[in-house]
Image (spheres, grey):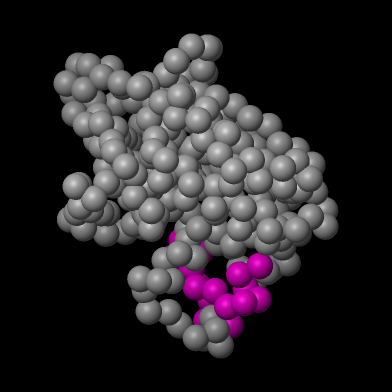
């Protein structure tokens, strides 16, 4: 299979730190299940020979006073977590963090699908008595031909860790470019809109945005509200229409 649109490494490469991996030569001898946790060498990281559909959520590590419980992790397709920890998290956001361990796109067309229909929101479940809203930012993009994906990826990684350490970022997820259209989608879920706005003014975020402006042919932002009402266990996603979200 030849891929039309190259892309920076996906965050699933971080899983390499925790897993024993096959040698690069074994990857060329056996066909792999695209839903398995991927393994890479220096070449296949940028030019994979087969589709990579394992796209787990990248969850912000919980504060030190809330140690991560391995028993809560799903056995199949577990999430990735950051090295940096959140400074704090409120109880409802902690419940959301736990159910987002199972966050995933519904199919490979997420980059061209309306946000409320692109992910498995209906499978997320929170305690019935909790009520809260969270702020979601969506990035739909198409890389400019010949742009430097490596420097953009490094800037994005630093901006992500910066956002976690300063608080508010619960989840970051991004896919790989559609091989026909080149379009991609990334999304962040924040404890509040104020947290997201504060992140915009930090140095690594500013650097990443400057590179994005140079690197993307298409770069569109959408904003949504993830809503959980008391008396229900599910969540809904609606367009943001102004005002503060969360706290």
Q: Residue at x 27, y 59 (%)?
A: 75
50 left or right of 226 in image: right
Tell me if residue 181 is in the magenta stretch. Answer: no
Q: Where the N terminus falls, by quadrant? A: bottom right
The percent position of residue 78, horizontal first and vertical second, equals: 34, 57
Q: Residue at x 42, y 40 (%)?
A: 166
The percent position of residue 22, horizontal first and vertical second, equals: 45, 82
**180 and 83: which is toward the camera:** 83
The percent position of residue 201, horizontal first and vertical second, equals: 58, 34
**106 and 23: which is toward the camera:** 23
Q: Is residue 238 above or below residue 155?
A: above
How many numbered badges does the structure rendering display?
Answer: 0
Q: Is residue 118 above or below residue 165?
A: above
Tell me if residue 44 is in the magenta stretch. Answer: yes
Which secondary structure dominates the residues rendered in magenta?
Answer: loop
Q: Is residue 221 above or below residue 65?
A: above
Q: Residue at x 42, y 66 (%)?
A: 15
Q: Identify the residue at the far right of this view.
A: 146
Which quadrant of the structure image shows residue 81?
bottom left
The percent position of residue 203, horizontal first and vertical second, equals: 59, 43
Q: Where the C terminus falls, by quadrant? A: top left
Q: Residue at x 37, y 47 (%)?
A: 60
**28 and 202: which is toward the camera:** 202
Which quadrant of the structure image shows residue 142?
top right
Whether residue 111 is visible, yes or no, is no
Range covered by the magenta-colored residues: 28-46
**89 and 147: which is toward the camera:** 89
């Amino acid at each position: 299979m030849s891929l039309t649109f190259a892309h920076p490494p996906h965050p699933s490469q971080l899983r390499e730190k925790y897993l024993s991996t096959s040698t690069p030569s074994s990857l060329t001898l056996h066909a792999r299940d695209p839903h398995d946790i991927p393994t890479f060498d220096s070449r296949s990281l940028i030019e994979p020979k087969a589709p990579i559909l394992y796209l787990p959520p990248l969850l912000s590590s919980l504060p030190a006073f809330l140690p991560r419980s391995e028993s809560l992790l799903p056995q199949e397709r577990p999430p990735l977590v950051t090295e940096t920890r959140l400074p704090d998290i409120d109880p409802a956001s902690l419940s959301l963090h736990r159910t987002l361990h199972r966050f995933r796109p519904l199919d490979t067309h997420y980059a061209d699908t309306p946000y409320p229909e692109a992910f498995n929101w209906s499978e997320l479940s929170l305690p019935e008595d909790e009520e809260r809203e969270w702020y979601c930012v969506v990035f739909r993009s198409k890389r400019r031909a010949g742009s430097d994906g490596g420097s953009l990826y490094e800037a994005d990684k630093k901006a992500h860790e910066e956002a976690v350490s300063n608080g508010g970022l619960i989840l970051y997820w991004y896919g790989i470019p559609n091989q026909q259209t080149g379009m991609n989608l990334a999304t962040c879920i924040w404890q509040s809109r104020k947290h997201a706005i504060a992140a915009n003014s930090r140095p690594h975020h500013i650097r990443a945005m400057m590179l994005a402006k140079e690197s993307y042919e298409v770069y569109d932002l959408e904003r949504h509200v993830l809503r959980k009402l008391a008396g229900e266990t599910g969540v809904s996603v609606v367009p943001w229409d102004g005002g503060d979200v969360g706290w």
